[in-house]
Image (tube, grey):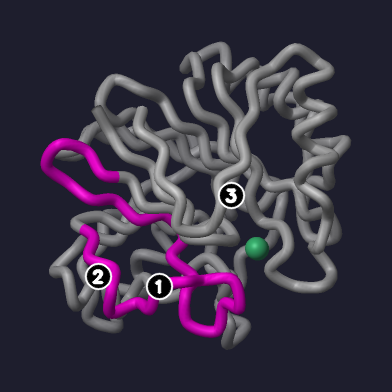
Amino acid sequence: MGKLTYLSHSAWLIESGKHTIAIDPFLEGNPMAALKPANVKADFIVVTHAHGDHLGDAIPIAKASNGTIISNFEIVNYVTAQGAKGHPMHIGGAHEFPFGKVKLTPAWHGSSFPDGSYGGTPAGVVLSVEGKNIYHTGDTGLFSDMRLIGEMTPIDIFLVNIGDNFTMGIDDAVKAVEFVQPKLTIPMHYKTFDVIDVNPQEFVSKVKAKGFEVKLLEVGETLEF
Ligand code: NI
Ligand code: MN
């Protein structure tokens, strides 16, 4: 049994029996976040790309928890230069960690650091934890190879961005669900800023109309899987 908690935006906490994994822990400066970085302890921190709303507080959380940042090669070079532990990977590669497997998937987006320096290629991530496969899209536009990701690894929980402007909007995210064929979909990356303030209920209705299971998680809400 694992636990998945929504920290708002694209930030999640996954608890397995023994380990805690944070994804894209953007808390400081995030108007939706209920937790401060000091309240988050994580053994591993997955960072999909270098933008400030995803790299977020990964470095201070990793340092305070003695945790390891899992990301692309360029981001791991950046965080290790600042004293955090890191494990570099890249698109298409998978690795077995103590909590389960991590595979980086493509994402159509950018990945510069807040200071403008190069953050490598943006990624999505498939995590296999407690026998379940969780696909976090990162920030991305729609691409039909999402179908391949779902074929190679049957997805139990699909964490998909719906906020539009920077990423897929609602209709493209519905098409992504049809490509991935997940058992359960949960939307993310909406409402945090005015420009991504879409109505998640519209997404829920449209996904249900296609015959897929979908759930909205409130900030701080936990789902057992
Ligand atoms: Ni981004
Ligand atoms: Mn973003």
Image quarter for ligand 2 equals bottom right
Residue 72 seen anywhere in this rendered image of the structure: no
Look at label 1 and name its amino acid: Leu
Q: Which residues are magenta?
A: 15-42
Q: CA distance from mark 2 to mark 1?
A: 16 Å
- Label 1: few (<14), some (14–19) or many (≥20) C-alpha neighbours in 10 Å: some
**SS assignment for the magenta stretch, majority:** loop
Residue 217, given in percent of the width and then of the height, sits at: 56, 45
Which SS class for mark 2?
helix
215 relative to 28, above or below: above
Going from N to C along the chain, the mark reached first, 3 or 2, is 2
**Residue annotated with mark 2:** 62
| Mark 3 C-beta to ligand 1 under 8 Å | yes
**Residue annotated with mark 1:** 35
Q: Please tell me whether residue 104 belongs to the stretch shown in magenta.
A: no
Q: CA distance from mark 3 to mark 2?
A: 20 Å
Q: Quadrant of the rendered structure where residue 175 is?
A: top right
Look at label 3 and name its amino acid: Gly
- Label 3: few (<14), some (14–19) or many (≥20) C-alpha neighbours in 10 Å: many
Residue 224, given in percent of the width and then of the height, sits at: 35, 33
**Residue annotated with mark 3:** 138
Side of 101 relative to 202 (left or right): left
Rendered residue at 45%/31% (across/down): 134
Look at label 2 and name its amino acid: Ala
Rendered residue at 32%/58% (across/down): 45
Residue 106, given in percent of the width and then of the height, sits at: 60, 40
193 relative to 17, above or below: below
